[in-house]
Amino acid sequence: MFFDDRLATVLRQRGDSEASVRTQYRQLLDILGNRKYGPSEIRDNSLIAAAWLRMDALAQRIPAEERAAMIRERGWRFRSADLAAHLSDFEPEVASAALNRADLTAQDWAVLIPRLPVRARGFLRLRRDLPVDVEQLLEQLGVYDRGLPLPSATGPRSETVNEEENTPPTLDLTDEVLEADPDESLSKDVDQVSAGVGDTQPEDPNETGRSEISALVERIAQFRRTRDNEVSEAELSPRLPLDEDAQLSPRRIASFGFCADAAGRIEWAEAEVAAMLIGTKLVAPRRLGSPEGESAFERAFFRRQPIKQAAVTLNGAEAIAGGWVVDGQPRFSEDGNFSGYFGRFRRLTETEGAGTTQAVREADRIRQLLHELRTPVTAVQGYAEVIQQQLFGPAPHEYRALAAAIAADAAHILAGFEELDRLARLDTGMAKIEKGDTDLAALATGMVSQLATVLGPRMAGIELDYADQAPLLVAIDQEEAEAMIWRLLATLGGGCASGESLTSTLTIDRGMARLTCEVPKQLMVEGSIFTAEAKPIAASVNAGLFGAGFTLRLARAEARSAGGTLTHEGEQVTLLLPLLTGETTLRSQSEGSVA
């Protein structure tokens, strides 16, 4: 017999830190937002009551903006009318997030809406997915698409209403009325009403039942009606298409929201662009055969995947024509069928437009794929570490050993993903090698010594020949240079067979540091070393997950980003890196150190 004790478990926790407070608030949202905790299925009223009290206590420690952001997150189910009613009593941003996030049935909405505070009902006017009978209920309660305007600054007079009229007059003061002092006009009109002006006899408020203020309100309304009826002859006359409007240009739209149906046709857009876009089809019908011509937007659309910064070109009116970047999320009906996308268009900037080449798009595809692959690998690594460290209880030593091996493999895979992402960024110019100062001679000497401890028992290794003993400074950050040199030397050294020794030299060549190294026979037989698929012979020396060719391509991309080159000619690989100072200065420093 199984039972759900999640709520009791959460309530037993203590929120000592800020992180634990926010975690517990999210947990209560997730549990109380589930439909099974509705009023008809509550097993323990005291437990639920304690949960509401705990949420109120946690809300006092979390700012309203953060609570609203937690409610808007899509990682939990909001199917409880009780939770929506509870959150609607909090700050406006929290109530708005709750009422726009709640996923309730028509029956739940019908019961919930009359229970909502009057100020919270207006938040439902922005929802377009409510059932028809719920929208009718909102209309009956007087909840419309637009809220009331803010009160004007005319003082208490704007709040006065003629009690004898069913509809109070609207106080839309004209320019002439606003130019006058409100207090002076009020006192003047009150004096006129009280004492009379000209032949007009004063009215006794006790006889008419009207106050001086209500009479003033009526005079303002009458003035407004008179002004609206007096239309000048110039306004009624037709205008010729002269040059006064020639300089007016339509405003370019910067961004707008949209909704598309399952066929990719825009069915809703913001009012500013609705007339220009509704009915536009964003994707062409999918064709049989190779999808090589598909754009990133079409590829994500046909696979029902989230759309992230996809480039799209719109044709039509000048206000919307041009390049755009689209972000969107797929929509699914209650029975799981795909129903389209909703998202936002934003203008493609000049920098983005210049860099949107085929290589950039392919690199973006690789980065998105890596992002999708990192999630399951990270989850596997996390669960393996939990078992290996026995965080959830004791585990047999065999399981712990297997878990440790799985965690190590996952870390190795994630490191390979990082290399793929780094190569894609370097090839497209989205990442640059940081500048700095590094002693290339000391760095290469140290790495050759490290490789000698591993390759020495096999009578293999790399011998470095550097005539000068002075420091050889290159204009690269220390960590960046270390990663690059290790990829180069470890890949070449790892390919050495037993008894094979490679020769490497380090010199200065026309203001550049020049590092050359022989290529092992294992890589020479494959033609181009940048496409070699050979694995290292020395299992303890592993420069990368994807083989020697990929690792050398990554080192070449790093060298290019640093202002140098990595080339292969004959039996040698040559690495050129820019010096931190001029060749003459370096040589003078070297001669001074020798003297």
Image (spheres, rainbow, N blue to C red):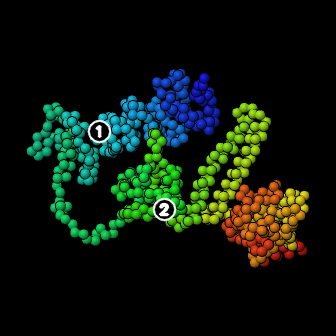
Callout 1 amino acid: Glu
User: Image quadrant of residue 17?
Assistant: top right
Q: Nearer the viewer, residue 178 or 99?
A: 99
Q: Residue furthest left?
A: 199
Q: Which residue is mark 2?
A: 348
Q: Which mark is residue 159?
A: 1
User: Image quadrant of residue 508?
Assistant: bottom right
Relative to residue 426, is residue 449 drawn left or right?
right
Q: Nearer the viewer, residue 554 or 44?
A: 554
Q: Nearer the viewer, residue 161 or 490?
A: 490
| Image spot of residue 470 (x, y percent) | 84, 70
| Image spot of residue 352 (x, y percent) | 53, 63
Looking at the figure, which quarter contains the C terminus? bottom right
* Residue drawn at x 15%, y 34% as measured from the top left: 208
Callout 2 amino acid: Leu
* Residue drawn at x 63%, y 30% as measured from the top left: 14
Q: Residues within 10 Å of mark 2 (few under 14, many from 20)?
A: many
Q: Which mark is residue 489?
A: none
Relative to residue 186, is residue 291 drawn left or right?
right
Q: Is residue 487 visible?
A: no
| Image spot of residue 224 (x, y percent) | 21, 49
* Residue drawn at x 38%, y 63% as measured from the top left: 316
Determine whether the residue tagged by mark 1 lies in a helix, strand or loop: helix
Q: Earlier in the sequence, mark 1 or mark 2?
A: 1
Instruction: Look at discs 1 and 2 and give the one toward the viewer.
Output: 2
Determine whether the residue tagged by mark 2 lies in a helix, strand or loop: loop
